[in-house]
Image: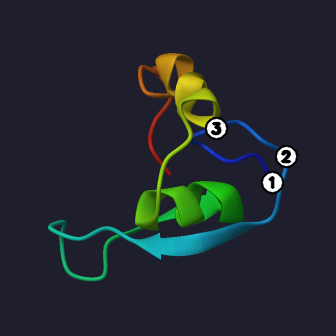
Amino acid sequence: MTCPLCASDAPLSSFPVPGGPVDASADVCATCAAQIDGTPEDAHWRGLTSSMWSEGAAG
């Protein structure tokens, strides 16, 4: 599947969203999940410029 944050074609896993509704989560690739919890690499997050403003409904 395609990661909604970085658009990589990789397996996705559920990542908890703190501060959201109970049991809120987002399906993201392992690279995004690791960088959310660790040190982000600027180049990896450049895909947010298009994915963040998508007119498609969130899944």
Q: CA distance from mark 3 to mark 1?
A: 12 Å
Which residue is painted at 83% across and 56% down in the image? 10
| Residue receiving disc 3 | 6
The outermost residue toward the bottom is 23
Q: Earlier in the sequence, mark 2 or mark 1?
A: 1
Closer-to-camera residue (33/7): 33
Q: Secondary structure at mark 3?
A: loop
Do tag 3 and tag 1 residues touch (Cβ < 8 Å)?
A: no
Looking at the rendered structure, the kind of residue marked 3 is Cys
- What's the residue at 30%, 82% (across, down)? 23
Residue at horizontal 68 percent and vertical 48 percent from the top: 3
Q: Of label 3 and label 1, which has the lower sequence position?
A: 1
Residue 9 shows which numbered tag?
2
Residue 30 versus residue 40 in the image, above or below: below
Are discs 2 and 1 less than 8 Å apart at CB?
yes
* Label 3: how many Cα within 10 Å (few below 14, some 14–19, many 20+): many
Callout 2 secondary element: loop
**Residue identified by numbered label 1:** 1
Rendering coords of residue 20 (x, y %): 19, 66
Q: Residue 19 vs residue 5: left or right?
A: left
Which amino acid type is shown beneath numbered disc 1?
Met
The residue lying toward the viewer, choosing from 37 and 11, is: 37
Q: Nearer the viewer, mark 3 or mark 1?
A: 3
Q: Name which residue lies at 42% across and 20% down.
A: 53
User: Quick one: SS at disc 1?
Assistant: loop
- Name the image quarter holding residue 8: top right
Q: Is residue 5 above or below residue 35?
A: above
On screen, residue 1 above or below 44: below
Looking at the rendered structure, the kind of residue marked 2 is Asp
Q: Residues within 10 Å of mark 2 (few under 14, many from 20)?
A: few
